[in-house]
Image (cartoon, rainbow, N blue to C red):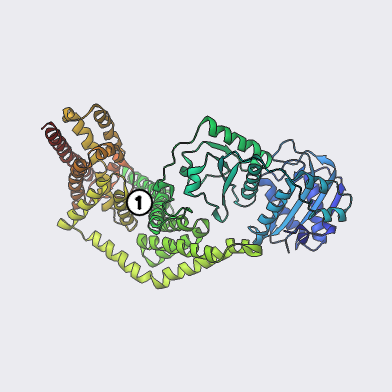
Amino acid sequence: MLLQNLTSPNLMSTNQSFSSKEEIIKYLIEQLGESGKLYSKEEFYQAVADREKLSPTGFEGGLAIPHGKSKAVKEAAFAVATLQKPLGTWESIDPNNQVELIILLAIPENEAGSTHLSLLSELVTRLSNVDYKNRLLNSKTSSELFNNLDYQDKKENIEEVEKINKTILAVTACPAGIAHTYMAAEALVKAGKELGVDVFVEKQGANGIEDRHTKELLNKADAVIFSVDVAVKNEERYSHLPKVKTPVAAPLRNAKGILTQALEKSESAPKKEYVDEASTSFEGNEDGKKSFKTEIKDSVLTGISYIIPIIVAGGMTLAVAVLLSQAFDLQELYNAEGSWLWLLRQLGGTLLGTLLVPILAAYMAYSIADKPALGPGFAAGVAANLIGSGFLGGMLGGILAGYFLKYLKHTVKPKGTFAGFISFWLYPVVGTLVVGSIMLFVVGKPLALLNQGLLDWLQGMSGTNAIIIGAIIGAMVSFDLGGPINKAAYTFCIGAMASGNFVPYATFASVKMVSAFSITGATIIGKKYFTKEEKEIGKQTWLLGLAGITEGAIPFMIKDPLRVIPSLVVGSAITGGIVSFSHIGLAVPGAGIFSLALLKGQPVLVAAGIWFSAAVLGALISMFLLIATRKSKLNKEKK
């Protein structure tokens, strides 16, 4: 990259005298304005000032790179100034930084992710060379400074550093996902070469994850560095590695020190065995790509994980409004538009009714194609609401948005001058128009009819049909205790809830207690048939059951699946059939035993009695089956 193409000699200033950062920035903006690079000097100054508030633009070794991205910039450019006397008051990553070289970047708003990024990366790379930086500082005239921008030393025969057979992974991420994310990555890679260490950096930036760490690298690595100011995506991938955590700016001032710390950690606390689990989202090819089946599964589970807090918050808010109106006879206030209780009711209802499907679709799309898919994903969810296709429409819309954006990212890559335009305009706008149009005009009516048909079927269930669907849900819940089949039942129940039918989730919530209660009962009543360890586990599972957690029974299932699974499934199916037949509903997921006060479809005490009694009855049946099958097993072993 030729830096001279983005500036000119009249934007170079040497040996200047200034007393403050603001004075320097205003001077350089004046230079840019006189060179015809700005539409408005005042507007651009405000953009630079706003950026200064976010984080330090001073670095180390006398360097500062203030910058602004604004519509007030006609074309990308930068101005440079060197100081006679270093300035110590410029906020810097290195608190002791004495600024004497300032480079002000002026970037058009639509080039925020392209020119801005490539220019910053190029400057940081060059300025990390002390000789290059000193040549700029020692320039006597504007022309000399301009000529030195692209001056390159003749390559010297530098003896290569001996490799030490260590592999360090790193993740860099900053809130904006642009500048520091890439600058920190560059610094770590450079330091690795100087230390003889293989460093592989995954950048989690504005365009999603770049240079994603593969399973091969995860298995080979000795340690990982998290240089981030935001949460690391898929952090569980690195659970086997010793970790070093730093702010994203730290490698810019001490990358070698951070790498040395990681190397020391790899010696003092060696890595554990790498386990390639599905939860790492890396089933599939060696390059880290997921199989289609895994991608769809992860997409659904990601979407559901993001809507659970919305459902809980909305359901509980709505429940509080209902309880207040009933407890204090405020029904009139509850129905009075604009009253505080009516507003509280609307808040809960909006979370459940309006936001649920768009959030589901957005994060399903996000799981497939990362950040660029969020906008089209939300649009797909809104379209699903508009056409009345509900939860099913949201799921299909999320998948459509995810794969369309994945295709778009692969076909139209954000490179060159238009990279920022592609990332921040083309992806969301084209994605929204295409996916939204497909949802509204192509699949809308069929989906709406299918969704309405499912809803009518669920609401029309009675007698034998209700018992059958409840028994199926119950059997699925306890078949693998939190595994894929359990999750499939959960997805169905959440979907029914989103469509306004709360019976399936009430069934699901009651059955979740069965396995836990039955294990506790079996290890107490039939204690002579169980080991000491099993009895200790049994003492705790009933508490987990009250919280709606089925996983406490997993040790029993793993040890003897052929007997335990059928025993739990039978009792759970009976519980599910009873709750479904009774038309008891529940609009708040994850509430455990507290669900008793939130049940619908019957008077509160009647609903609570049936719901809890069904769980106890199913647990008793499973308990006797557990004891009988264990007794039979022990008798066979004796013979």
| Residue 336 shows in the view | no
Vertically, is 119 above or below 273? below
Residue at the spot 62% in from the left edge and 37% down from the top edge = 258
**What residue is shown at x 20% (from left), y 59% (from top)?**
461
Q: Quadrant of the C terminus?
A: top left
Position in image of residue 580 (x %, y %) = 21, 52
Q: Using the image as rendered, state which of residue 164 and residue 297 is in the foreground.
A: 164
Relative to 258, say whether 419 is above or below.
below
> Which sits in the foreground, 583 or 309?
309
Left-right relation of 403 to 101: left
**Residue under circle 1?**
332
Side of 357 relative to 457 (left or right)? right
Query: Which residue is nearer to you in this view: 616 or 78?
Result: 78
128 lies left or right of 136: left
Judged from the image, the secondary structure of the residue bearing numbered disc 1 is helix
Judge the density around disc 1: few (<14), some (14-19), many (≥20) Cα neighbours within 10 Å: few
Measured as percent of width and height from the top left, residue 110 is found at 65, 62
x and y percent of residue 608 in the render? 23, 43
What residue is at 60 percent from the left and 47 percent from the top?
A: 174
Amino acid under label 1?
Glu
